[in-house]
Image (spheres, rainbow, N blue to C red):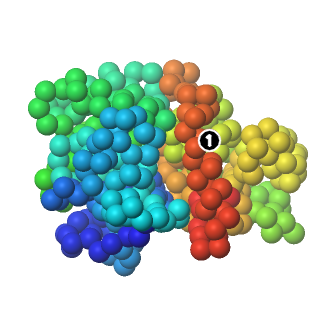
Amino acid sequence: MATQVLPFEDVKRFAARLGADINLVQGRSGTLSVKHSGLMWVRAEMASLAIAEQSEIFIPLRIDKVLSGIAADLNDPNEGATLEAELNQQTDKIVRPLPYAALDALIEHPLVSHVTPPDLLAITSEANAQEILSERLKGLRWAFASMAAPGANLNRSVATALGQKSGTIDILIISHWGAVVSGADPATVSAHLSALTQRLARPSRPIPEPALSDLKAMITNDESWRLPKYQEIHALGCDTHSLEACMKGLLTLGQAMTLGLGLPVAKPREPLWQTALRHEKEFHERPGYIIIPHVGVVVASELTPQTEALLSGFARMTLRLQTTTDLLTFTVDDIKQYLEWQKNRWFEESNSPEFSGVSTKV
């Protein structure tokens, strides 16, 4: 399932700008699609918007096939909508369209972006999220969908939210997920994005100083760990409210999918290897980072830039939380089916010689 040349240079430029804006997209968390002549061009699963002008990252899908797949409650409606599927050819198991981009077919506008602003994620993690959004987005054409596991569940949630509104929707907020912002062209989508971010902006607590000497001592003679590239990541260990909020449960879907099902927190005077082993036994996954309360954070030496950027965005989100007692957390059971499905896809990637080392999982 190969990418193809996207015949819209303005969309490529817009995708690259979007992917480079850390206040809208972190790592590979953002995506973009464009509809034209019965086709919907969506981002390849393992690509990043930031490289849209350097590499071909879009895959064309038949919109009618995507919609019929959604109607059939398929978890990945894109699989039967590729040009290879149309020609009864074998599909590529590695270069695939991003599965949740299928929901873009439900959006009326031709150009659809997915963004994850930290301010918005903080708001949708709080119990009074819909009340805050209703007040701040008054006058805009927007809708709200409940968080659901990507695939059939999320597509149903989005279809329900859109069906409850009359007229065209420009902004769709998905709880614990982000925003789907759409329009006729890049200029229009940019205007909607500006309106969204300006209205949802909220103050951030300052990034506390980590105990760098202690962290450096912990990783001396241990090449498995390093200091994070982004200073704000240390907030997860040094900001009391951030740490307390994270300990409550899962706050964003991106956190569950990429950053881990549980928070890898070191116990007092516990060696890093022991924290990692304890976490792996409990959650059956090797942690990509470890939080040392009141000290800071270390990250795995092989942590990918995409995942580290996502971790940075997550930390900035927690600094914008205004409560630690009234949060809308969710459990692994809420998205268990999707995580198992995605785990199998990652397993395929990790066993492919073509894609070794590319996965965001550590």
The reply to whether residue 111 is visible in this rendering is: yes
Q: Is residue 243 left or right of residue 286?
A: left
Q: Position of residue 66 (x, y in %)?
A: 31, 47
Q: Is residue 47 left or right of residue 209?
A: left
Q: Nearer the viewer, residue 214 or 226?
A: 226
The residue that label 1 is drawn on is 340
Relative to 357, is 187 above or below?
above
Q: Is residue 303 left or right of residue 312?
A: right
The reply to whether residue 200 is visible in this rendering is: no
Q: Which residue is drawn at the image coordinates 46% and 41% (left, top)?
A: 75
Q: Quadrant of the N terminus?
A: bottom left
Q: Which residue is drawn at the image coordinates 65% and 56% (left, top)?
A: 347
Q: Position of residue 357 (x, y in %)?
A: 64, 69
Residue type of the residue flagged with mark 1:
Glu
Q: Which residue is drawn at the image coordinates 61% and 55% (left, top)?
A: 346
Structural crowding at the residue carrying mark 1, measured as other residues with C-alpha within 10 Å and reported as few (<14), some (14–19) or many (≥20): few
Q: Quadrant of residue 186?
A: bottom left
Q: Nearer the viewer, residue 196 or 87?
A: 87
